[in-house]
Image: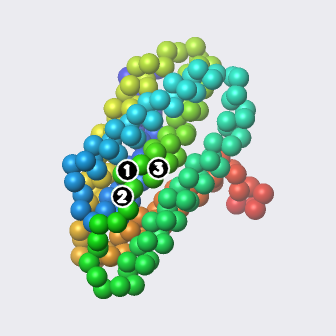
């Protein structure tokens, strides 16, 4: 696999992280340097670690993980997105300016988001294992690319949240977007085929 192909793969894997970073920044009262650093490092780390984990697991637990990874990612995104949506709707009902509230770039919310957006990278590790390819350089490229794209997502989210047209509705939009990403993951894995979707 060429460097260009690995980079393209890294960008593709980072798109969910970008969208989540945008949503997370929309829900913050004020975006600081620490928010950029925490999100970029956490998302980049997990995007790099998941392919390595998948590579080591190889064929041993592949069928089990592939059967459930999308449901785990969906549940995590619904949990965080639902909380954002709930808080955003509460804030939108009052005329008070956005206050410093729960920070999704700290503690459990950060861990949940980082894991949820990187679960797909497990499959990449599995495929590299099947192809008997080394995982270390691709994992590094994937992690660094994701960290940079995540930081760009935080910047975009900050700009969107500051736009007058969105105002207090930015957190609601962020929560809905996380729910949509979770649904997209299920659709990509044909997990809703029993519903005819």
**Alpha-carbon span between mark 3 and mark 2:** 10 Å
- Please indicate, yes or no, whether residue 8 appears anywhere in the rendered image: no
Q: Position of residue 58 (x, y in %)?
A: 64, 22
Q: Is residue 40 above or below residue 80?
A: above
- Is residue 70 rendered to the left or right of residue 28? right
Find numbered disc 2 in the image and state the secondary structure of the residue it sits on: loop
Q: Which mark is residue 103?
A: 2
Q: Which mark is residue 63?
A: none
Find numbered disc 3 in the image and state the secondary structure of the residue it sits on: helix
Q: Which residue is mark 1?
A: 106
Q: Position of residue 159 (x, y in %)?
A: 24, 62
**Sequence-wise first label, 3 or 2:** 2
Residue drawn where x is 43% and y is 71% of the image: 87
Nearer the observer, 13 or 20: 20
Residue drawn where x is 42% and y is 53% of the image: 20
Q: Residue at the left extreme?
A: 33
């Amino acid at each position: 696999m060429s460097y260009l192909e690995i980079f393209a793969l890294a960008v593709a894997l980072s798109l969910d992280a970008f969208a989540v970073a945008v949503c997370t920044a929309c829900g913050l009262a004020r975006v600081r340097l620490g928010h950029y650093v925490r999100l970029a490092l956490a998302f980049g780390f997990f995007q790099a670690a998941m392919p390595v984990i998948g590579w080591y697991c190889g064929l041993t637990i592949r069928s089990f993980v592939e059967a459930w990874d999308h449901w785990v990612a969906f549940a995590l995104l619904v949990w965080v997105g639902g909380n954002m949506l709930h808080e955003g709707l509460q804030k939108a009902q009052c005329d008070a300016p956005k206050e410093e509230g729960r920070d999704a770039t700290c503690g459990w919310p950060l861990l949940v988001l980082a894991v949820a957006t990187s679960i797909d990278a497990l499959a990449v590790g599995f495929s590299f294992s099947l192809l008997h390819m080394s995982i270390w350089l691709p994992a590094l490229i994937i992690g660094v690319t994701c960290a940079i794209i995540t930081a760009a997502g935080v910047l975009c989210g900050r700009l969107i949240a500051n736009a007058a047209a969105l105002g207090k509705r930015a957190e609601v939009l962020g929560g809905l977007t996380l729910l949509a990403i979770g649904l997209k993951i299920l659709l990509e894995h044909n997990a809703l085929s029993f519903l005819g979707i």
